[in-house]
Image (cartoon, helix red, strand yellow):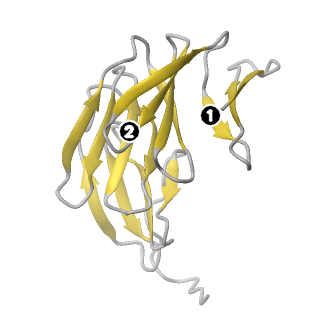
Amino acid sequence: MDIDEHSEKPELPSKLFKFSSNNTSIFFRDDSRMGLKSISVEDGTELAHMKDMHKKKILDFVLLQDQTTIITASKDKTIKVWDILSQTMKEKLEENTGIVTCLCLDPSEKYMFSASYDLKIIVWYIPTWTKLCYFKSDIEVDFLSLTLDNSFLLATHRSAYNEMDAHAYWRI
């Protein structure tokens, strides 16, 4: 990798950012936090800017490996599925009654898990965008992750006051 100390630096992403599966672009929230931008890893040029994707701040998003689909979770209590190329919404999932805080995909991308402050973790079947079931949580979940063998779904609540985090898990 060649580094030119005198080249113009690209705009730095907000804390919430993801690399595309082929590592050619970075997606991150725009300044309004209600839209997303993508930039080229190679030269920092803006590739896309999807504005006003939600009515309130985007709290999480995931990219499908097809690199044409992005899924967003928001404070407006919705999950939206977007076509990146046409910048259009393909689906709107409104099963949550609380702020949707985070998303997690299984490696096959057949299932997605969403957590919200209504204390539900919903399991979605991606090919049809249908809700399969939900898990009841005892904590407000801020982060979801699958174990490496995909046998457990792990959930964490991060305290704003640096207190001990709360954790929960379910066998999948």
Q: Which mark is residue 81?
A: none
Q: Is residue 148 left or right of residue 75?
A: right
Image quadrant occupied by the N terminus? bottom right
Q: Residues within 10 Å of mark 1 (few under 14, many from 20)?
A: many
Q: Residues within 10 Å of mark 2 (few under 14, many from 20)?
A: many
| Closer-to-camera residue (157/92) | 92
Name above or below for residue 19 compared with residue 120: below
Q: Is residue 46 left or right of residue 65?
A: left
The image shows a total of numbered marks equal to: 2
Question: Label 1 is placed on what type of residue?
Answer: Leu
Mark 2 in CB contact with mark 1 (< 8 angstroms):
no
Residue 83 visible, this angle: yes
Question: Label 2 is placed on what type of residue?
Answer: Thr
Name above or below for residue 84 compared with residue 88: below
Q: Is residue 128 left or right of residue 73?
A: left
- Name which quarter of the figure residue 132 lies in: top left
| x, y percent for residue 146 | 67, 41
The residue depicted at 32 percent of the width and 66 percent of the height is 46
The residue depicted at 66 percent of the width and 13 percent of the height is 139
Residue 52 visible, this angle: no
Image quadrant occupied by the C terminus? top right
Secondary structure under badge 2? strand
The residue depicted at 36 percent of the width and 20 percent of the height is 77
| Closer-to-camera residue (169/42) | 169
- Name which quarter of the figure residue 71 lies in: top left
Secondary structure under badge 1? strand
Q: Which mark is residue 144?
A: 1
- Tell which circle, 2 or 1, labels the residue nearer the N-terminal end: 2
Q: Which mark is residue 72?
A: 2
The residue depicted at 30 percent of the width and 41 percent of the height is 81
Query: Mark 2 to mark 1: distance in Å?
Result: 14 Å
